[in-house]
Amino acid sequence: MVGAVQDRLGFLLQTSSLRENIFIPKYYNPEITSRLHSLAKTHNLICISDLVSKKHLSVDTGDEIGKMAYGTGDIPFVRTSDISNWEIITEPKQGVSEEIYGFYANKQDVQSGDIFFVRDGTYLIGQTCLLTEQDLPCLYQSHILKFRISESSPITNSLLLACLNAPIVKQQIRSKQFTADIIDTLGNRYKEIVLPIPKSTTLKNRIAKEVQSNITDRISFREKIRKIPLWVEGIISDLDSSLPEDWSWRSELAGNHGFVRNVSAIQGNVFIPKYYDPLIAADLHCLAKSHEIVSLGELVKCRAIEWATGIEIGKMAYGTGYIPFIRTSDISNWELKGDPKQNVSDEIYEENKQDVQAEDILVVRDGTYLVGTSCILTQHDTMILYCGGIYKLRVKDKKKLDPYLLLSLLNTPIVRRQMRSKQFTRDIIDTLGKRLFEIMLPIPKNAETRKRIVEETRRVIEKRVQLRNRAKEIAIEVEGI
């Protein structure tokens, strides 16, 4: 075997080179070693354990607060699925009360500038975000590590974020994760990760500066995403308005303490109380003064909208290529993740090619807390496949309804509340099924307001996608590629 090619497909390793009784081949991937060796000419290779031992970096873990704490308040409890594209999603799926937050706040000590790093969770492992003032206060779960750079550190937090997303670091993360019980994890192996820090001061400073600028701009636009649905519904007058302190009661989790309904008013043998929430009906009645209330089903019937569902390609297709296979967890903050977790080959793509176009809207149909999550595709997102748990909506008559207006409508509090009231459990997963088309959309009657909403929504989406794509390029530039 002397002179044989040593790569991830096959290699020889001396028994003396085994570490801690680890016999998993990918852990010793020679391509990673070779790549790090080549980077040593232009980069300082620093192990995370060295940063920790020299107190340049502190690392802490979050807490499991228990499901009984979920939904008790509005302070975000950040979980692994709430981190995407270097940021926290606009509406983390679980919130906690001031009391519960106060119990954990001092121990967790979350600050602006901290980095969250997903340690547990299979395909989510390695996801990162840099926290800003807009993300506070919050708590985070035990599957997440909190990295904090000290003042004496040779690298900044923004440079660390870029390095953690460099291709060679992503490769190391995949090679070192393992299965613990029923979940994949990095365990303490995150300390073994080697960071490629550019020796060039010019490159290093440019990357750090651009990362910080990118995050600042994306967070600014993310805050507009938080406001647009409220503007559409008339809760605020424009995007310059502040979020009302009492608007949270209108959220998708809002409910009531009880009501009476005649048996004759039962629809389709549905006996679940939340399906008939009278508060939703009352709010829709009030909105009818300033909005045209139209169901998605009516828009489909008059051919203003058409819909389709995705496909299941099977797990054997995962990881066979570089074309994204979009799953429900790959949608957040009205966009696709920059690094969808499953990709397929050109052959599988061609065999299963779906009709996907810019301005199509993807809506999550199945998946408990993800139900109702949506995004609009841009010209950068059309070479994809998408899974069966997702609806694709396409506006056919833009004179009746602009796709960017439809996206904002789907995210209004009144629509999200309807979605939550109509989802049900089928087998082992929650779904909206075809109840999606029962949803009533509140379309503003004022033409000028509609026009402004479309323009602002389009601008926000396009800018954020540009910044998302630039972030991916920055991570590659860390290695000098």
Image: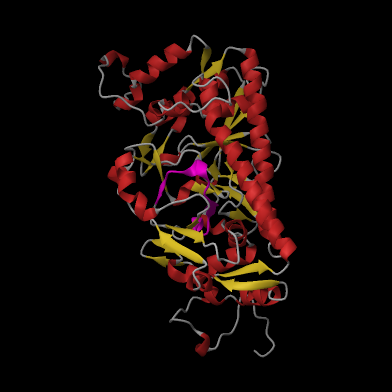
Q: How is the image coloured?
A: secondary structure
Is residue 87 at all visible to an observer of this figure? yes
In the rendered image, which quarter is residue 396 located in? top right
Q: Residue at x 32, y 45 (%)?
A: 102
Quadrant where the image shows the C terminus: bottom right
Describe residue 39's horizontal placement relative to residue 19 as left or right: right
Query: Residue 18 or 137: which is nearer the viewer?
Result: 137
Q: Residue at x 46, y 43 (%)?
A: 136
Query: Residue 12 or 414: which is nearer the viewer?
Result: 414
Q: Residue at x 59, y 65 (%)?
A: 169
**In the rendered structure, does residue 204 fall within the stretch colored magenta?**
no
In the rendered image, which quarter is residue 375 located in? top right
In this rendering, is residue 322 above or below 227? below
The image shows residue 465 at horizontal and vertical percentages of: 66, 42
In this rendering, is residue 53 above or below 296? below
The image shows residue 219 at horizontal and vertical percentages of: 58, 41
What range is drawn magenta here?
A: 123-140
Q: Residue at x 48, y 36 (%)?
A: 365
The image shows residue 296 at horizontal and vertical percentages of: 52, 22
Number of numbered labels in the structure image? 0
**In the rendered structure, does residue 131 fall within the stretch colored magenta?**
yes
The image shows residue 289 at horizontal and vertical percentages of: 49, 9
Query: Residue 189 or 340: which is nearer the viewer?
Result: 189
